[in-house]
Amino acid sequence: MIALVALLQPLAVALGAPLVLGLTRQVRARLEGRVGAGVGQPWRDLRKLAGKQRVRPTGTTVVFLAAPVLLVGTTLAAAVIIPLVGVSPLDRAGDLFAVVGLLLTGTVALTLAGLDTGTAFGGMGASREVTIAALVEPSILMAVYALSLPVHSTSLAAIVTAVSADPGRVATPAAVLAAVALGVVVLAETGRLPVDNPATHLELTMVHEAMVLEYAGPPLALLEWAAAMRLTVLLGLLANLFLPVGLATAVTGAPSVAALLVGLAAVAAKVSVLAVVLAAGEVALAKLRLFRVPELLAGSFVLGMLAVTASYFLITPTG
Amino acid sequence: MSETSYVTVLDLAAGGLLLSAVLVVWRRDLAALVRLLSWQGVALAAIPVTLGAHLHDAALLGVGVGVGVLRAVVIPRVVARLLLHEGSPRETEPVLNTVSGLLAVAVLTALAYATSRSLVALDPTPATHAIPLALAVVLIGILVLVTRRRALSQVVGLLLLDNGIAAVAFLATAGVPLVVELGASLDVLLAVLVLQLLGDRMRISFGGTDLGELRELHE
């Protein structure tokens, strides 16, 4: 039965991700006084793009063709490993570091594709993306380190199981600081405001959009789909690391179909709430100048670092 | 209050103290600095209140409430009056840019932990375990004092320093005598009032409170 988790999670992420994206767009539209296109619009967009003719810019190589597939593949692989619905049986395949590495592989594939097109925008977007990724990595590592210290393991299953066994762990300064640091990092990784504006096509500001500018038709559909899945996976991970309510774990006994359904509903609810909060927050934010982004990420790094020091030194008697 | 929740609340208060100090280094908006100062006052007051509730010490509770009123409400209001006539609401380019400032904060925190290890080892209780955090706030206060240029940010830096010292006192001694705490608090209030007057005079005489421009004589 536990093997079902490994099947269910990528399936749920694949099907639900465009809806999460649609939800953020819809909330944003309503808050701005527009009617909005509806939650299902990203799915309709994907269907439309998938039915279009394949166009490949002249001079591009296999790197350009492989990037969308790699991006989707790495994101789905991450969705198999991380505990979203329940603790995955494939958890031993990779810890939190491995998940970060998987997602970074996708990012690198996309930047290489941006360079492969040989256009000015592709190169510019790739350069910006790599800059941001290089600054994001130290803060992710710090936050992960802070989370793994109390459990003495970087395994996601161990961290999540420990927190669900003792919810009081979340109220420590270390966990709060790590949560804020990871939150900022998730914003940067998924290209949301204030790091990147997902709705812009302005030359001066776009990062992710600049890299995928040359894509059209089915490959573009894959890229958009992968971006939505990344957002969903990272929001789900953030929610479950700090609030693993309803997660089907070994603690609650052998997971039955009912436990899996509860887990699915719980993760869907948590991701939806986070998506609504994200969209509502974005309405009030403007994009940071690219030169100010390092400040934001340095702040996130310092919070991660403080989380590590706090979990080292505030080891308090329990009981 | 049970032992676990006492430790949790105390740790969160100390963590909040440090977090607000880090955010002071991060932000350049002067109005935000005043709000952060107010939040830090709340976190600082939470320490004696928690200790008082744990030790069943009414005097400590009273001190906590007094500290809270003074540092979360009165002092931020006095400081905010400096803002009233301030021309631009943002810090001019600080001596140290924000990224280096934040990295310096990380180093200072590590330094505070390293230096106070032996202090904690003397009497390892939950309260003394939080001393490094308070010491880090003291160091960050000094950092803000030496790297900021506007008078208001420097006053905020001084208050960070003082909040840190007060927090160390509460955590290390589990209750300063009421008279001592009263004296120290009034001292701070008086210093802030004087600094506020000084800031106003400076603005009237020189048209701004950018201390970087006061280094050399002007015609």
Image (cartoon, rainbow, N blue to C red):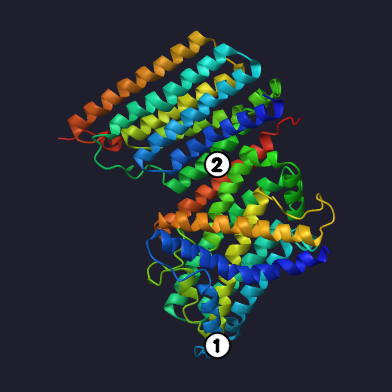
Residue at 60%, 16% in the rendered image: B173
> How far across and down, in percent of the image, does residue B24 sit?
44, 38
Seen in the picture, residue A147 relative to A16 is either above or below; the reply is: above
Parent chain of label 1: A
Mark closer to the observer (1, 2): 1
Separation (CA) of disc 1 from disc 2: 52 Å
Res B83 quadrant in image = top left
Residue at 53%, 49% in the rendered image: A300
Residue at 57%, 86% in the rendered image: A61
Does A90 sit left or right of A26 as displayed?
right
Q: Identify the residue under disc 1.
A: A51
Q: Identify the residue under disc 2.
A: B106
Q: Secondary structure at mark 1?
A: loop
Bin the neighbour count of mark 2 within 10 Å (Cα to Cα): few under 14, some 14-19, many 20 and up.
many
> How far across and down, in percent of the image, does residue A105 sit?
63, 69
Q: Is residue A68 visible?
A: yes
Depth check: A249 or A126 in front?
A: A249
Seen in the picture, residue A253 relative to A14 is either above or below; the reply is: above
Depth check: B88 or A260 in front?
A: A260
Parent chain of label 2: B
Q: Secondary structure at mark 2?
A: helix
Mark 2 belongs to which amino acid? Ala
